[in-house]
Image (cartoon, grey):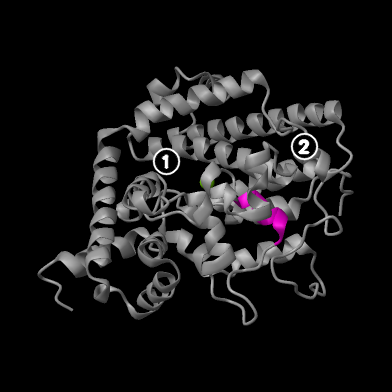
């Protein structure tokens, strides 16, 4: 194992778990967190949840599972190069999307609207809810009982209202503190991963045009390099070679820029990272501008494509219809979800009741949500 820097997260400086447990025999704190995430039900469901494309659109596209694995790969590379805790960055990366609804952002926006009068719905907060409360894996406690540092990393954003209710974990949003460097790494790794794979998936789906992409600097440069070196390469291999170089460039820039920022700040502990006032894991200004240019391109050309919009609209309607029908008649809920609702309702009235429905819907995969909608609303499936 490479040597951890003083500002990296370590087993010794960990702020511990919600419920006290004996240490694992062969594994460190964050290795154990990562393993618990991998064995969770929510992690397995990521295979059938998507970000841009609905799961049944084809088997070629990224799912949230393959996305999370790509994020973990990038995060591990960066964490190791900066002598940070690789296991922690990996655990956060694998867990970061656990709370996502079916149908990506369309599903999340729709569920947030449904929950407007009941505290709203934030996917980051839901990821935390999954690992803290909803997973049913252990005899001694609800949830996965992950360490503070992994939970801190999972909660990437949080509204001030919600932060106020989260105790120690919410404090940094109220005090304007940063999370540990491993969390900062996982956060940027997420952005790098999805920007680049959305280019790949967008091209593959025929929604993004190769000529249009050449107006984007971060694509154009490696594209020119690759086509100069291999003018006769088939298009798929050209695209992959370009995307591979795009990711590599960003990752190298991230490592170099972050190392400089860390050296300049010279934090002596993870506490000094948290109170540094600014993030220390960052891209150079030039790389960040290119990254933002690519994001803008994808927003206009992919996320707002009419075919994506059609999926988005259908997805939002499915989520809304399910939420409304379960709110009107809770007898439609399967037993486990009905029991969960009874429990939350007795503790928290109408808000608890709505939260239980949100938990049920957020836990669905794309295809399960479509099937459940069909089972409830289609006259031809009276079973
Ligand atoms: Mg993500």
Residue at 43 percent across and 70 percent down: it is 344
Q: Which residue carries the number 1 mark?
A: 201
* Location of residue 185 by image quarter: top right
Q: Element at badge 2?
A: loop
Q: Quadrant of the N terminus?
A: bottom right
Q: From mark 2 to mark 1, how far is it between C-alphas? A: 39 Å
Q: Where does residue 376 sit, x and y in percent of width and height?
A: 19, 68
Tell me which label, 2 or 1, sits earlier in the chain.
1
Per the rendered image, the range of residues in magenta is: 147-154
Q: Which residue carries the number 2 mark?
A: 275
- Crowding near pointer 2: few (<14 within 10 Å), some, many (20+)? some
Question: Would residue 83 be found to the left or right of residue 194 on screen?
Answer: right
Prevailing secondary structure of the magenta residues? helix
Q: Where does residue 324 sit, x and y in percent of width and height?
A: 24, 59
Q: Is residue 262 magenta?
A: no
Q: Where does residue 355 sit, x and y in percent of width and height?
A: 40, 62
Residue at 84 percent across and 25 percent down: it is 264
**Is residue 227 positioned above or below 34 on the image?**
above
């Amino acid at each position: 194992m490479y040597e951890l820097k003083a500002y990296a997260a370590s087993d010794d400086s960990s702020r511990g778990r919600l419920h006290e447990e004996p240490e694992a025999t062969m594994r460190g704190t964050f290795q154990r967190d990562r393993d618990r995430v991998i064995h969770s039900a929510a992690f397995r469901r990521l295979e059938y949840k998507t970000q841009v494309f609905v799961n049944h659109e084809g088997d070629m596209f990224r799912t949230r599972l393959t996305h999370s694995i790509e994020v973990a790969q990038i995060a591990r590379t960066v964490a190791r190069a900066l002598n940070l805790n690789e296991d922690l960055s990996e655990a956060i990366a694998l867990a970061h999307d656990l709370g996502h609804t079916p149908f990506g952002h369309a599903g999340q926006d729709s569920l947030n609207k449904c929950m407007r009068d009941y505290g709203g719905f934030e996917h980051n907060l839901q990821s935390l809810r999954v690992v803290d409360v909803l997973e049913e894996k252990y005899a001694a406690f609800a949830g996965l009982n992950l360490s503070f540092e992994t939970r801190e990393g999972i909660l990437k954003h949080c509204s001030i209202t919600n932060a106020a209710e989260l105790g120690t974990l919410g404090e940094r949003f109220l005090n304007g503190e940063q999370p540990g460097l491993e969390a900062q790494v996982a956060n940027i790794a997420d952005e790098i991963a999805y920007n680049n794979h959305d280019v790949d998936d967008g091209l593959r789906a025929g929604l993004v045009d190769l000529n249009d992409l050449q107006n984007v600097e971060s694509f154009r440069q490696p594209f020119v390099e690759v086509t100069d070196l291999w003018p006769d390469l088939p298009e798929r291999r050209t695209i992959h070679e370009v995307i591979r170089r795009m990711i590599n460039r960003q990752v190298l820039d991230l490592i170099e820029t972050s190392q400089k920022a860390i050296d300049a700040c010279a934090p002596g502990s993870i506490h000094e990272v948290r109170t540094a006032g600014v993030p220390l894991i960052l891209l150079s200004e030039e790389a960040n501008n290119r990254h933002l240019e690519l994001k803008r391109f994808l927003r206009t050309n992919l996320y707002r494509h009419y075919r994506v919009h059609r999926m988005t609209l259908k997805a939002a309607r499915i989520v809304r219809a399910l939420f409304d029908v379960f709110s009107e008649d809770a007898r439609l809920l399967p037993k486990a979800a009905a029991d969960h609702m009874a429990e939350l309702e007795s503790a928290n009235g109408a808000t608890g009741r709505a939260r239980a429905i949100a938990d049920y819907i957020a836990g669905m995969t794309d295809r399960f949500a479509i099937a459940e909608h069909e089972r409830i609303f289609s006259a031809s499936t009276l079973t």
